[in-house]
Amino acid sequence: MSIAERYKEIENRKNEAAKRCGRDPKEITLMAVTKTHTAAEINEAIDAGATDIGENRVQELLEKYDSVKTVRWHLIGHLQTNKVKNIIDKVVMIHSVDSLHLAEEINKRAAAAGIRMDILIEINSAMEATKSGIAAEELEKLVKVITTGLKNVRVCGIMCIPPMALEPEDARPYFKEAAELFAEMKTWDLPEENFAPTVLSMGMSGDFEVAVEEGSTIVRVGSSIFGPRNYR
Ligand SMILES: *Cc1c(COP(=O)(O)O)cnc(C)c1O
């Protein structure tokens, strides 16, 4: 199957999963995750309908940026503060904010660029040492400090990456937990210009249908669209 065919198949599965649980398929964005894949491959997905793409590494995003057709870029991997300046005018959302320090740097660079950057807070549901993300208990405090102190960022929700699993169902408890946190977040009374909790970024190739059932609004799918990755 071509990338275009696989993209359409995943989009269809995403839409069917939404309908099965009574959700409007349009509520859920299919993001194509493009790490290790070429600009030409990414353009194939865009031609097939991809509107949003996710890159993990700043350097890789910059290498491809000019060769990829117009699309909404998301940064979904761990972001070092010294690289924020390189992508601040290129991405529409940063999914992987896991410290006040990083949020402050994004705020500073967004202010310099004259924009307000949309961010998600990454939750480390299982508290795995190898993964970034904050503990669920730290979420409220961090979001309050960011939304009341940093004028040039807007907290739009949560991203979660459950532990690697063999079965899609294994991810469900983590998705449920993230969805509960997200629902709680929506009740917080924080400045509207800096707080718009509308995005729950969860679900990957192996488990995106479960994520849709649990309330995801952006699924991040890589290998099911582009095939296996060869890391350089
Ligand atoms: C690589 C990656 C994905 C996509 O993973 P697949 O299993 O290939 O679909 C999603 N989210 C993040 C943060 C990733 O790093």
Image (cartoon, rainbow, N blue to C red):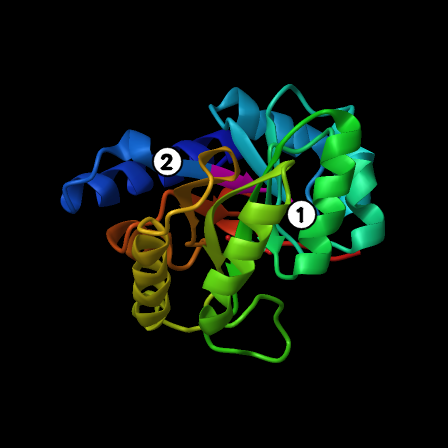
Magenta stretch secondary structure, dominant = strand
Residue, disc 2: 11
Please report whichever mark, 1 or 2, sits nearer to the chain's N-terminal start: 2
> Are the two marked residues, 1 and 2, in contact with CB atoms closer than 8 angstroms?
no
At label 1, counting other C-alpha atoms closer than 10 Å, the crowd grade (few under 14, some 14-19, many 20 or more) is: many
- Give the vertical position of 127 relative to 52 (above or below): below
**Relative to the observer, which residue lies in front, 74 or 120?**
120
Quarter of the rendered structure image containing ligand 1: bottom right
Q: Amino acid at mark 1?
A: Lys
**Relative to the observer, which residue lies in front, 155 or 36?**
155
Q: Amino acid at mark 2?
A: Glu
Q: Is residue 94 magenta?
A: no
- The residue carrying mark 2 has its beta carbon less than 8 Å from ligand 1: no
- Give the vertical position of 212 relative to 136 (above or below): above
- Give the magenta-colored segment's residue range: 31-35
- 46 sits to left or right of 26: right
For image coordinates 61% across by 71% down, the residue present is: 131
What number is the disc on residue 35?
A: 1
